[in-house]
Amino acid sequence: MARPKVIITRKLPEAAELRARELFDVELNAADTQLDVAGLARAMREADGLIPCVADKITAELLAASGRRVKIVSNYGVGYNNIDVDAAKANGVVVTNTPDVLTEDTADLALTLMLATARRAGEGEREVRSGKWTGWRPTHMLATRVNGKTLGLIGIGRIGRAVARRAHHGFGMRVLYHDPFPLSDAEAASIGAERRESIEAVLAESDFVSLHCPATPETKHLMNAARFAQMRNGAILINTARGDVVNEGDLIDALRSGAIAGAGLDVFEKEPVVPDALKGMENVVLLPHLGSATMETRVAMGMRALDNLEAFFGGRAPRDRVA
Ligand code: DGY
């Protein structure tokens, strides 16, 4: 029997591509170029299964197109806001994601941004590299302490919990959270997390606010002018979730006016475009969507996406079905 045809839109770590070749009649993207809409449409016509990434918009038009052959979209990522899930359901296309495997590394990156922003690491690095450092002095580049401060989490799913564990046990932080789905008492106690009834209540008490909610129509621009006004003046925003969750224009205004003290951002509204206003601010640390970017995790994400395809084509329920 012919093996299912699978198209992987971007280059994956070698181990995952080798596994893909073992399992499927696979089309890889050795040049690692982004597929345009026509390229994605061709992939939807020519493959049985597709592995796209966050930057590939799998729209209702692609999913509803006549001549579509793809029956499963196995997203390479835990977030799947790049896929029109309602259209997938309406057109009988299965959608899966890659949870669990990226939790720890994404939490590490949230802490990286928190520390780097609070301790002015980006600014300090730039000073050293530019040759402008004149030597040690008691008042040089004084920053904000992280240890013992209050961290507010918006969303307490897998990554939010992993961040809370690090912050509470590693940095002695008081951890507050808001999430529509509260933790059990035992789980909350194990990571030192206290629930608040509203996002506003978390913002009002937190020195650091870290976003860990999915990008949905409900969370679009969840952080906006009104919410920045609720944050403490010296507070720092961390976003490793999705750019859409933050109104970037309002964030720039809040940073300019001093309503908040800084931001550590791994994700942006119009990736890879980052507003020049943010690039010009010393109190902002900017990373190019690296949350899950370790070799270990990117291999594991590939294996997980392939496992989902293998199950589907083998007539079994894929483990990570989201639609
Ligand atoms: C994820 O898995 O959601 C990462 O942000 C990459 O898409």
Image (cartoon, rainbow, N blue to C red):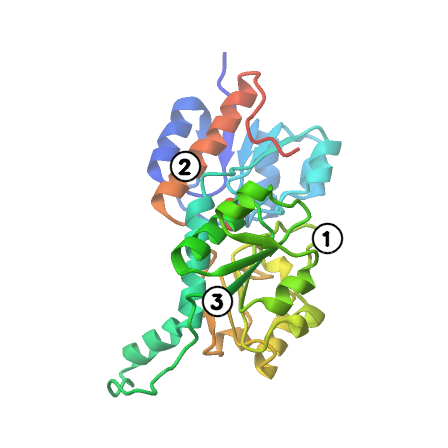
Mark 2 vs mark 3, foreground winner is 3
For image coordinates 46% across by 50% down, the residue present is 165
Query: Are the residues flagged by discs 2 and 3 in contact, CB closer than 8 Å?
Result: no
Mark 3 vs mark 1, foreground winner is 3
Q: Residues within 10 Å of mark 1 (few under 14, many from 20)?
A: few
- Taking the image as shown, residue 287 lies to the left or right of residue 37, namely left
Residue at which label 1 appears: 218
x and y percentages locating residue 189 in the rendered image: 52, 47
Residue at which label 3 appears: 149
Q: CA distance from mark 3 to mark 1?
A: 29 Å
- Taking the image as shown, residue 146 lies to the left or right of residue 14, namely right
Mark positioned earlier in the residue sequence (1 or 2): 1
Mark positioned earlier in the residue sequence (3 or 1): 3
Mark positioned earlier in the residue sequence (2 or 3): 3
The answer, for residue 12, to whether it is visible in the render is no
Q: Residues within 10 Å of mark 2 (few under 14, many from 20)?
A: some
Identify whether 208 is placed above or below 257. Answer: above
x and y percentages locating residue 29 in the rendered image: 43, 41
Q: Amino acid at mark 3?
A: Lys
- Considering the numbered disc 3 on the image, is that residue within a helix, a strand or a loop? loop
Give the quadrant of the C terminus.
top right
Return the mark for residue 142: none
Mark 1 vs mark 2, foreground winner is 1
- Considering the numbered disc 1 on the image, is that residue within a helix, a strand or a loop? loop
| Nearer the observer, 291 or 21 | 291
For image coordinates 68% across by 39% down, the residue present is 85
Give the image quarter of residue 178. bottom right
Q: Amino acid at mark 1?
A: Glu
Residue at which label 2 appears: 300
